[in-house]
Amino acid sequence: MESLHLGIIGMGDMGKLYARTLSAAGWKNVNVCDMPDKYEQLRQEFAHTSITVMKDGHQVSRKSDWILYSVPAEFIDSVVATYGPSTKIGAIVAGQTSVKAPEIAAFEKHLPEDVYIITCHSMHGPTVSSRGQPLVIINHRGSVEKLALVERILSCFESEIAHLSYKEHDRITADTQAVTHMAFLSMGTTWKHQENFPWFDPTYTGGIENVKVNMAMRILSNKWHVYAGLAILNPSAKAQVRQYSLSVAALFKLMIQEKEVEFVTRIRAAGDFVFGNRGQREQILLSDNLLDQYSLGSVPKEKIKPNSHLSLLAMVDCWYQLKMNPYSHMVCQTPLFRFWLGISEYLFLNEDYLQDAIQAALYAREIREDDMEFMMSVRGWQECIALGNMEGYRIRFEDTAKFFQDRFGEAAVIGKRMIEMITSKTSAGVEASSKPTAAN
């Protein structure tokens, strides 16, 4: 590799992933830093590597030709304000935040005019292989030559490159991340309020339920601020989160009144909009036999109880109400979103499963308590996001996580196996024409 210096400001899990991947690919000059109090710890951690730990972002910025800010979205403005003015003339600056509007605003406000802004976002977490996963590149202020250099730097991740504008990115990730995460968090909050460990409950047994339980546990075992920033700081997220809450409430009101005709008509219209003409395509998830392998509990299948799948019915209704095609968002898919769309697809394309869910929703009164709690949990999360309340989000998240923390170890093992399974599948069923190509 040539003598370019690559810099990373912020050495959390993703920052470390980037540093190690770039170094392993042969880039000899990788400069990194974090908070000053972590300097000695990082020096020891990377003592026997080619990665150079620097004292602060000023040193990284002055030395590096390509600089990546890998910090939480809520801190991006203050961090760029501090270190941005030290950016080397002609350098390329990027960010790894999951919300690009505040990141771009910080770059435009605090960076010198003689630097390039070509930012990026790896659509996966630090424990997931980057190979084959989407990697968004946003050429906000850069030349053709600089864009080509960025693509070469990032090629070592072996990801699928997608070129978008920052507005396109935020609009799509509001759906693929913010709403998806809120749905899983609402399930966790519901179970916590019910004092219910779902892996012991016959209502939450079976293939689709394994996805719900394991992915909810995966989110709750992680850091709250990752999800808070995605939901609260993304300009597009609040409208989509609000519609999901409205869809849950509207369907639940029809359920408790047992208005079958109105309920079924609404569900069918939503299903036709999202999944129409898709019965012949390869499904994202194949069968219960595949998903049954990933259970945290041991409830026999013959004891399975009905489930309305209100969370999934409402998600499809939400897409319908917003006239949003989730398949067009596969360009920014995450493993969690692929699971979420996959189990929604699996439910709606299996007529027997869909009929069972509709009948349970309307007439299985023994599960209405759970569905009511779910509606209330969704509304609570939606109001927290609408108010932009980071502290409230943290408290809700950590309070829910604490209830399940004893099972996080086992859930992490099973969740990792599930993620490996879903990421190993190709997205051949997604039409190539659905992928956005324009970047500006």
Image (tube, grey):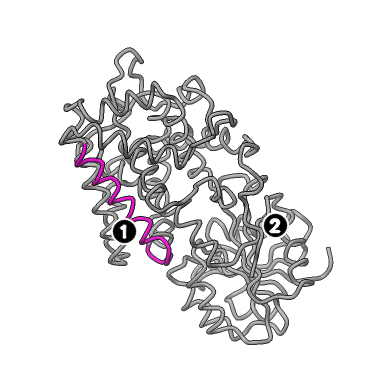
Residue 345 percent across, percent down from the top left:
47, 34
* Residue 221 falls inside the magenta stretch: no
Q: Which residue is mark 1?
A: 394
Is 315 rendered above or below residue 301? below
Q: CA distance from mark 2 to mark 1?
A: 37 Å
Q: Residue, x 29% and y 51% (percent of image)?
A: 245
Quarter assignment of residue 411: top left
Q: Quadrant of the N terminus?
A: bottom right
| Disc on the earlier residue, 2 or 1 | 2
* Residue 432 on image: x %, y %: 66, 46
Pick whichever, 310 or 337, lies toward us.
Answer: 310
User: How many numbered marks are there?
Assistant: 2
Q: Residue at x 42, y 54 (%)?
A: 178
Q: Between tags 2 and 1, which lies in front? A: 1
**Is 375 placed left or right of 13 in the picture?**
left
User: In terms of image quadrants, where is residue 92?
Assistant: bottom right
Residue 131 percent across, percent down from the top left? 67, 45
Across and down, in percent, residue 265 comes to 31, 36
Q: Is residue 32 visible?
A: no
Q: Residue at x 46, y 67 (%)?
A: 73
Q: Mark 2 = which residue?
A: 48
Residue found 58% across the figure and 68% down from its top? 95
Q: Is residue 382 above or below residue 85?
A: above
Q: Is residue 436 left or right of residue 172?
A: right
Question: Is 270 placed left or right of 150 in the picture?
Answer: left
Secondary structure of the magenta portion, mostly? helix
Tell me the SS state at disc 2: loop
Q: Amino acid at mark 1?
A: Arg
**Along the viewing direction, whichever of 303 and 26 lies nearer the viewer:** 303
- For residue 234: magenta? yes
The range drawn in magenta is: 232-254
Report if residue 398 is visible in the image. yes
